[in-house]
Amino acid sequence: LGQRLRGLLLVGVPLFGLYNLLGFEAGDTATFGFAGYELDVLRVDKLSLLFGYLFHIAAFVIGVYSLHVKSRVEHLTAMAYAGSAIGAVFAGDLLTLFIFWELLAVTSVFQIWCAGGAEARHAGLRYLLAHITSGLLLLVGTVMKYHESGDLSFGAMGLESTADWLIFLAFGIKIVFPIAH
């Protein structure tokens, strides 16, 4: 796309998404059949709505801020990152969360690499290693949780099982364990 149309999409898509999000209410859901499983690709509650609004606003601000950037890759990965974050926020099951979790890792690494140079490549690889590790912990925890309960739903969890601990560690790595980094 040309620079002007790309700029329009950078600010228009988050606004359109936010407009659509305004029609959601706590309790709204959507499922999708995949490989014999019913995935809860959308589960709306008050907290996910709050983060959904915030992420849409952030995507809009990023779009405005990046209008001067010429890199198509940077624009694409920024919007894909925002979409992945929104997908993760509204994920109603652990498999859907895992898919968006990994998309977050990949798109953010490409954002880092857009800076160019050896330093960005090394930083991107370190980042990728940490977040792929996080994703693997989430995946193993998800598989163990499914094996234990036969359920992929994503809701309140305690720390009663190894699966719970692996999922907790995955979240901790993703948020860089406050105070411990």
Image (spheres, rainbow, N blue to C red):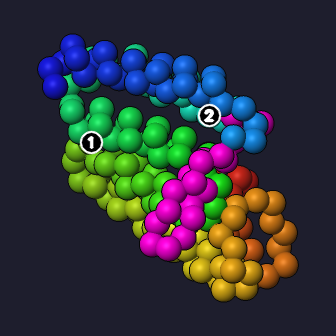
Q: Is residue 18 placed above or below 75 in the rendered structure?
A: above
Q: Which mark is residue 52?
A: 2
> Could you say whether the residue bearing mark 2 is in a helix, strand or loop?
helix
Q: Residue furthest left?
A: 2
Percent coordinates x, y for residue 107 in the rendering:
37, 49
27 left or right of 61? Answer: right
Q: Is residue 67 placed above or below 74 in the rendered structure?
A: above
Percent coordinates x, y for residue 116 in the rendering:
23, 44
Quarter where residue 121 is shown: bottom left
Q: Residue at x 21, y 33 (%)?
A: 72
Residue 45 part of the magenta-drawn span: yes
Q: Which residue is mark 1?
A: 114
Number of residues whose C-alpha sits closer than 10 Å to that of mark 2, classed few (under 14), some (14–19) or many (20 or more): many
Marks 1 and 2: CB-CB under 8 Å? no
Q: Amino acid at mark 1?
A: Cys
Q: Quadrant of the C terminus?
A: bottom right
Q: Residue at x 47, y 46 (%)?
A: 84
Nearer to me, 92 or 177 = 92
Q: Residue at x 42, y 54 (%)?
A: 103
Q: Is residue 63 placed above or below 150 in the rendered structure?
A: above
82 left or right of 51? Answer: left
The secondary structure making up most of the magenta span is strand
Q: Quadrant of the N terminus?
A: top left
Query: Magenta span covers which residues?
Result: 29-49
